[in-house]
Image (tube, coloured by chain):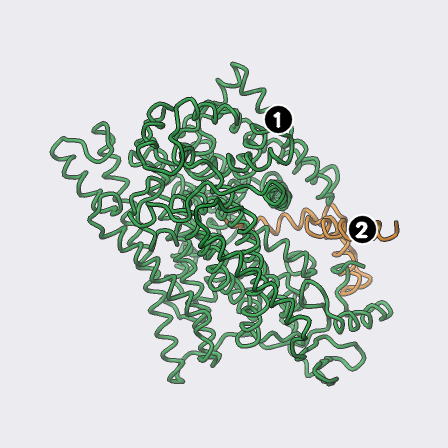
Amino acid sequence: MGRAAEIARQISWYWGSLMGDNHYRRYVEHRHRSHPGEAVMSEREYWRMRHDATESNPNPRCC
Amino acid sequence: MATPTATPSDRIEERDGDVTYIRTDKDLPPVAIIDRSPITTRHKIIFGIIALLGAIAWAIIAFFRGETVNAVWFVIAAICTYVIGFRFYARLIEMKIVRPRDETATPAELFENATDYMPTDRRVLYGHHFAAIAGAGPLVGPVLAMQMGYLPGTIWIIIGAVFAGCVQDYLVLSISVRRRGRSLGQMARDELGAIGGAAAIVGVLVIMVILLAVLALVVVGALAESPWGVFSIAMTIPIAIFMGIYLRFLRPGRVSEVSLIGVVLLLLAVISGGWVAETSWGADWFTLSKVTLSWCIIIYGFSASVLPVWLLLAPRDYLSTFMKVGTIGLLAIGILVARPIMEAPAISQFATKGTGPVFAGSLFPFLFITIACGALSGFHALISSGTTPKLLEKESQMRLIGYGGMLTESFVAIMALITAAIINQHLYFTMNAPAAQTGSTAQTAAEYVNGLGLSGAPTTPAEITEAAQSVGEKSIVSRTGGAPTLAFGMSEVLHQVFGGTSFKAFWYHFAIMFEALFILTTVDAGTRVARFMLSDGLGNLGGPLKKLQNPSWRVGAWICSVIVVAAWGGILLMGVTDPLGGINTLFPLFGIANQLLAAIALTVVTVVVVKRGLVKWAWIPAIPLFWDLIVTLTASWQKIFSADPKLGYWKQHSICQAAQSAGKLCLSAKTPADVDKIVRNTFIQGTLSIVFASVVVIVFIAGVMVVLNALRGSGRPLTEDEPVPSRIFAPSGLIPTKTEREVQKQWDALPKSPARSVGTGAH
């Protein structure tokens, strides 16, 4: 049972990282680490910023 | 962006037998492990068995005649070759050329901002990289190449990937990582000088336009006169917009959740497409001609490039990633469970004669440009430089991501090849020969394919109609472009495993939908990327054009979008109305363009390798470079100068021009208007061929000059960045070694490690 739960956790971690679910958490951790004590964007603002960044720097997708 | 400077750090090396541990900070665990231990006997035996198994599989594919060959042998041959290539050839490249330095920080660590620069777990980055490089290309090329039989395509896809495609992707990634993730165009300018660099940038832009046009043409070929297909693809737009709004306003950041909802809606769209297509209003609204569909795609491409990213582009990209990983896994399971048998011959009559209806020209060089993605794809160089380097944790992971990512794409191409090879040969040519030959009805198509001298029993019009009905279509005659054939083969495989005969129509339209989804994702992202390249390139000219480089200047964005969309849209419309058949005249241009881009990338790589003083190992990128140049320049030469009216654009042009002035018809033209079209189209195609080839020759000559200067010791210096010590650790391969696990434990044991990149590993 413990092993199955561990595998399920690993898969959900992988999928979440691939699709982007935990990107915000990662951002918060990064801010705390590199700029401790400073204000951190909310999740909504963070994704707005991410999409604005792709606006002028799109990721090419191949054929 | 502030540039972190190389602080004088204490580099501490500890040796323990064959393993060297490198620390950049005496208070932190090692950041790099150099393992020089020789290969163990156990590994020798394992790799020996894999090599033997691969050799047996290859022998069965290549020499087994009389009996039919099972698809599983292709899978075994491919996987064994990939394992050996990855373990030995990629390792050789790693040791002799790439020489990763894990004690040096990658761009991702250096500039980490948790948005575009972000050290990402190697397995996740592998997934990202794969999703970015794989699309419809490796699915379509092998299908078209099947007209020459399965053997040439199989050899080229597997061997080409190991010695060319993977090498290109890996080495471009490695040089971009040492240059802070600079793009291919920028690296060409830095390494080849102004002229070579400018030619490379122009080349990338022009090549991109033709790629987008031909991919859009494939979608049009798949959706024309198919109300079911058009409905399900049309539904992807409202679904994407719904997802975009959901992520923006309802639940920001819940990407998997919304993608899952999107996929369920997508499946509903595919199922309901069957019902809609049966109603009279559905058939009325969604049966669109090729020209109307082209206009829809042109308008879509333009809107996607000027609308906000969050509304359409980003959610569609999520959907596409989800579908890509899911469907390719599904197809692999399907092939392994159904274990279908090859219907195609190993080498067909068209391989030598070069008179095949699907694409003109003989095996050499045209097979090698028809299968571009899957064996060697220049477009990947745009992803290996730029996007992926900014997410890479450790230099030693590049082998897994660059080389390994391309191996996976090659495997996708092999699965597409299997899918096309298991289709009845008569049906294959019914679907893929242009309408000018099949005459568009089941009756004429049956007569035409029976006259081709194919193996197997001749077909009847009733069989063709029945095949169409089995997948829920009115007709499958001349559904060119490769996508419908792949969908047909996929429905053959998947219905045996999931759902039975009644699911054939569902799987066919499911396959059509996901191919169209990939292509439209490439088209909308590509249009945007090309728009920025154009505004950047024009801005470099200076003067009033400088204003274009400001991304917030909306008018400029609109103007550049219009130019880009008009360029590919024009070629698309030219393709769909082409009296000579469209896909069979344009697909070679797509392949040539993609392979010429690879020539540019490999030139840049070879130049860097020589400049680094690794002349002895320059053959590693030089072999694929020379092969690629020979193939593409021969193909270009034939397309430009061939006196065969099936092959040479200018020959077709002059024949029809003569006919035009004499007021007669020419080639497959049926009306004087057709003659005018051929005259115009062949002029454009011929001119493009000349432009492509010249640009690449210029880049190559610039590369040769730089190499000669470097050999004389008087060249420009390398533009690599100063190394900055790394302060993070991560394993290199897919599975961590014993020593890596031990070091990882030391890092995990650190109390709230200040320097560690958090959130990137499973913990």
**Badge 1 is on which residue?**
B271
Task: State how many labels appear.
Answer: 2
Alpha carbons under labels 1 and 2: distance apart:
32 Å
- For the C terminus of chain B, the quadrant is bottom right
Q: Locate residue B266, reporting x and y percent.
A: 63, 32
Query: Does B8 sit left or right of B158 as displayed?
Result: right
For residue B342, above or below residue B189: above
Given residues B4 and B666, the one toward you in this image is: B666
Residue beneath the point at 54% across and 46% down: B71
| Disc number placed over residue B281 in the picture, else none | none
For residue B722, above or below residue B405: below
Given residues B695 and B49, the one toward you in this image is: B49
Chain that appears orange: A
Residue beneath the point at 47% across and 77% down: B617
Q: Locate residue B432, reporting x and y percent.
A: 39, 36
Given residues B317 and B543, the one toward you in this image is: B317
Chain that appears green: B
**Badge 2 is on which residue?**
A9
Q: Amino acid at mark 2?
A: Arg
Dots 1 and 2: beta carbons under 8 Å?
A: no
The answer to whether residue B547 is seen in the rendering is: no
Q: Amino acid at mark 1?
A: Ile
Query: Does B600 sit left or right of B502 as displayed?
Result: left
Q: Locate residue B111, reporting x and y percent.
A: 65, 66
Label 1 and label 2 in one chain: no
SS assignment at label 1:
helix
In this view, which residue lies farthest toward the left? B662
The crowd level at tag 2 (other Cα within 10 Å; few <14, some 14-19, many 20+) is some
Residue beneath the point at 63% across and 72% down: B44
